[in-house]
Amino acid sequence: MLRRISQGWGAELNGIWPVTRGQAVLRLEEFTETGRASFGHYEDVTLTAEWKLAHSCLSSSINHGLLPPGELIAAAEDGYTIVRRTVRRKIVRFLRRSRVRRTTEWIWVTFVDGAEWVMALNVVGMALFADGGQMATKPYASGGAYLNRMSDSCRSCRYNPKRRTSPDACPFTTLYWDLLNRNHETLRSNHRLSRQLAGLDRLPNLEETRDRAQDVLGLLDSGQLESCRTLNIEAGP
C-alpha cells in the first residue's frame, strides 16, 4: 500500500488536467487536431515560455483510465500520430543513497500521471536503471549538451554545458561522463551506448572529470551546489 511520504497530495485542480471522461476526450481531439503534426519532431523539446509545446498531455488521462488504449490506437489507425507518455518531466534531485522504493513512491504522489502500473518501467527501469536493464535497454541519462540542444534553460544558466572539469562546468555534463566512466565495464556490451562509450574513450582529463564529479556530488549532498535554472537545487532534507 502506498505510504504517504509528503505533506500533501499535490496542487489543487486548476483545469489543466482532465478529471472526467468528457474532458479527456476533448484533450485527445485537441491534440489530434493541433499537436500531432509537430509531435514527432518536438516531443522532447522544452521551452521556458511555453509549458506544453507539442506534448500531448494525455498520460494522466490514460493512466487514470479516462482514455482506453484502444481509443488512441483507433486514432492512430485513422492517420494520427501514435500517442505516448509526453507530460513534461521535471529534472529533480535525488540523494545518492535514496532507496528505489522511496523514489518511486515520491513520484507516485508528486506527478499527475504517476500511476503505479507505469512506475516500474519509467522510474525503476528508465530513470534509475535499478533493474540492470531488464525493462530499459540503457540508462536514460544525458549531459548538459543534450539539455542545451533540447531546451532554452541553459541560456540563462551560469554553468557551461560544454565543460566537464572547470568551476563553471555543467554538473550534468560532469556527472554524465563520470557515470559512463564508472560503469564502463557493465555498459560496454550495450550496443545502444557504443557511440557514447567511444566518445568516452577519446575524452582527455578523465581523472579530473572524476575528481570534479566527486566535488559536485559532495556539494549536492550537502545542499551547497550553486543552483541554476535547470537543476533547481535546494538544500537537502
Image: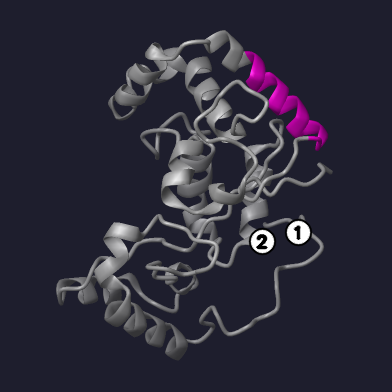
**Magenta segment, prevailing SS (helix, strand or loop):** helix
Q: Are marks 1 and 2 in contact (CB under 8 Å)?
A: yes
- Count residues near mark 2 (Cα–Cα under 10 Å), then give few for <14, some for 14-19, many for 20+: some
Q: Earlier in the sequence, mark 1 or mark 2?
A: 1
Q: Is residue 141 visible?
A: no
- The amino acid marked with disc number 1 is Arg
Left-right relation of 78 to 64: left
- Count residues near mark 1 (Cα–Cα under 10 Å), then give few for <14, some for 14-19, many for 20+: few
Q: Find disc 2 in the rendering and name its residue.
A: 109
Left-right relation of 220 to 149: right
Residue 173 % position (x, y):
53, 31
- The amino acid marked with disc number 2 is Val
Residue 48 % position (x, y):
55, 62
What residue sits 70% from the left and 36% below the top?
98
Q: Find disc 1 in the rendering and name its residue.
A: 4
Q: Is residue 216 magenta?
A: yes
Q: Nearer the viewer, residue 149 or 65?
A: 149
Q: How many marks?
A: 2
